[in-house]
Amino acid sequence: MSELIIVLLLLVPVVVVVAILINGQKKRKKKVQDKLFAYLHEVIQHHGIVPGYQKQFVHQLVIVDEKNRTFLIVNYKDGRFSYDLFPLGAIRSIKVVNHKQTLVSDEKGGKPEIFSTQIGVAVELEKNESEKFLTLYDYVEHNIYHMAELEKEAAQLCERIKKALNGKPIEA
């Protein structure tokens, strides 16, 4: 009986602390999400954007407006928000990119290991020959087991934007 009480006295504070931490994290995440959607609403209202296709990534949100033929990228990180808006006609090329890095072992005879650091969609614009990179997979933010799924999602996003460039409607 006394062992049960000791176990409960040790276990209850741990469970309470974990519950408080999880609840605090959920509240912070919701607060950031609310700020993002308020900012997004403001940008959409200001530019008269009609969202046709919308996708949210780790630190970016993409909206394709088929009616006005515009492309909006909202960047958000550490509570800072910015956006890039340009016509679909300004896109020169679009492709899936897999950034890789080589890690060399200090051991003798150790083979270099190649791993993906980021997977995303590179959107090359005609104006100033600039490029926008939409990050779907980041090795810091994601588990390696999500990489294949997110690479497939990047290919699907690329195809959807190409359809919009060709004037074909995008399925949700």
Image (cartoon, helix red, strand yellow):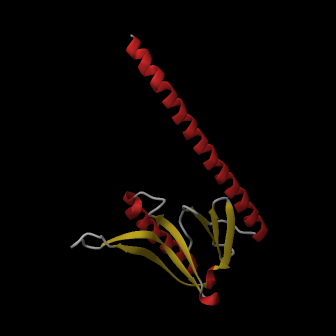
Q: Quadrant of the C terminus?
A: bottom right
User: Is residue 166 visible in the rendered structure shown here?
Assistant: no
Q: Position of residue 28 (x, y in %)?
A: 63, 47
Q: Quadrant of the N terminus?
A: top left
Q: Is residue 120 left or right of residue 106?
A: right
Which is more toward the observer, 35 or 71? 35
Which quadrant holds residue 118? bottom left
| Extreme residue toward the left, this view | 109
Between 60 and 104, which is closer to the camera in this rendering?
A: 104
Which residue sits furthest top? 1
Q: Position of residue 129 (x, y in %)?
A: 59, 88
Up-down relation of residue 145 to residue 117 (above or below): above
Residue 48 coordinates in the image, percent (x, y): 75, 69
Residue at point 39% right, 70% down? Answer: 116
Residue 101 appears left or right of 38: left
Which residue is drawn at the image coordinates 48% and 59% (left, top)?
A: 141
Quarter of the image for residue 149 reads bottom left
Rendering coords of residue 158 (x, y %):
49, 74
Up/down of 38 relative to 165, above or below: above
Q: Looking at the image, which residue sits at the far right?
A: 46
- Between 61 and 27, the residue placed more toward the observer is 27
Residue at 39%, 74% in the rendered image:
101
User: Residue 21 falls in which quadrant of the image?
Assistant: top right
